Amino acid sequence: MTEPAGATTFVVGLDRDTVLRRREVVHKIQWVGGWVSAILAAIGVVLAVIFVVYAVFVHPGADMWPFALLMLLSVLPLAVINARSLRLTADRKRWFAAAELPRFAMRMSPSALELGVEGAPAPVVLPWDVVKGFKVRQPFGEPVLEIALNPGVSGLDHPAAKAALQPKRMLRSPGFVAVAALDQSVEAIDAALRQFSGGRTAILR
């Protein structure tokens, strides 16, 4: 949908089904990848333990125990990291389930840019002079918009602002929202950003 010429606001809506579908795809990729890595790490730990037992008790005269111990110490951190990754994937799924989607992705007016924030009771309002623009990223092969602020911006310590602008990267991707879930094209958003900000803000190339 496109706002008429001369409109005082420009609203970018969200397709709820697309957002939920993307979340499920990302969750499956992370869950399957995490379990495959965890299984491989567990096999490595078992093999390292067998090597240590062999070097220390079966063939102690061969002086292989330093290498066996080094092998064990090298695979143990991988097992711990993969276990943590699986836990974070589960935490991320619970976070999404508890965070309600906003009514819109963003709303522009001549005075400010408003960002809809998951789980927040109200949008984050950013004056145009603090907004540098949006970057298009592809963290899982699908374009998402990530907001970029001008250097030296302060005063954004409100929990809702932190949730939108400084998310916990281990829990949630910093990408703002999937482009496919928006009811406006990137080109239309770019044109609206330039119009409402007086040319100060745009999609960053």
Image: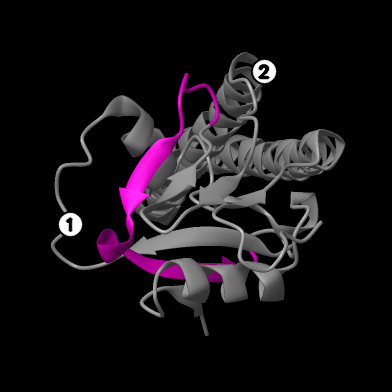
Side (left or right) of 172 relative to 7? left
Q: Is residue 142 magenta?
A: no
**Tag 2 or tag 1, which sits nearer the N-term?**
2
Percent position (x, y) of residue 118? 55, 29
Residue bearing mark 2: 97
- Considering the numbered disc 2 on the image, is that residue within a helix, a strand or a loop? helix
Percent position (x, y) of residue 193? 51, 69
Instruction: Give me the residue at 38% from left, 46% from top.
Output: 165
- Most extreme residue toward the bottom is 205
- Considering the numbered disc 1 on the image, is that residue within a helix, a strand or a loop? loop
Residue 125 against residue 152 in the figure, above or below: above
Residue 144 against residue 119 in the figure, above or below: below
Percent position (x, y) of residue 55? 48, 44
Side (left or right) of 21 relative to 57? right
Image quarter of residue 47: top right
Q: Nearer the viewer, residue 20 or 141?
A: 20
Mark 1 → mark 2, Cα distance in angstroms: 31 Å
Q: Are marks 1 and 2 in contact (CB under 8 Å)?
A: no
- Range shown magenta: 118-138
Between disc 1 and disc 2, the foreground one is: 1
Side (left or right) of 131 relative to 100? left
Image quarter of residue 103: top right
Whether residue 166 is visible to the viewer of this picture, yes or no, is: no
Q: Quadrant of the N terminus?
A: bottom right
**Amino acid type for the residue under numbered disc 1:** Val
Q: Nearer the viewer, residue 138 or 39?
A: 138
Percent position (x, y) of residue 102? 61, 30
Residue bearing mark 1: 153
Instruction: Give me the residue at 64% from left, 59% from top.
Output: 144
Whether residue 13 is visible to the viewer of this picture, yes or no, is: yes
Residue 27 against residue 198 in the figure, above or below: above
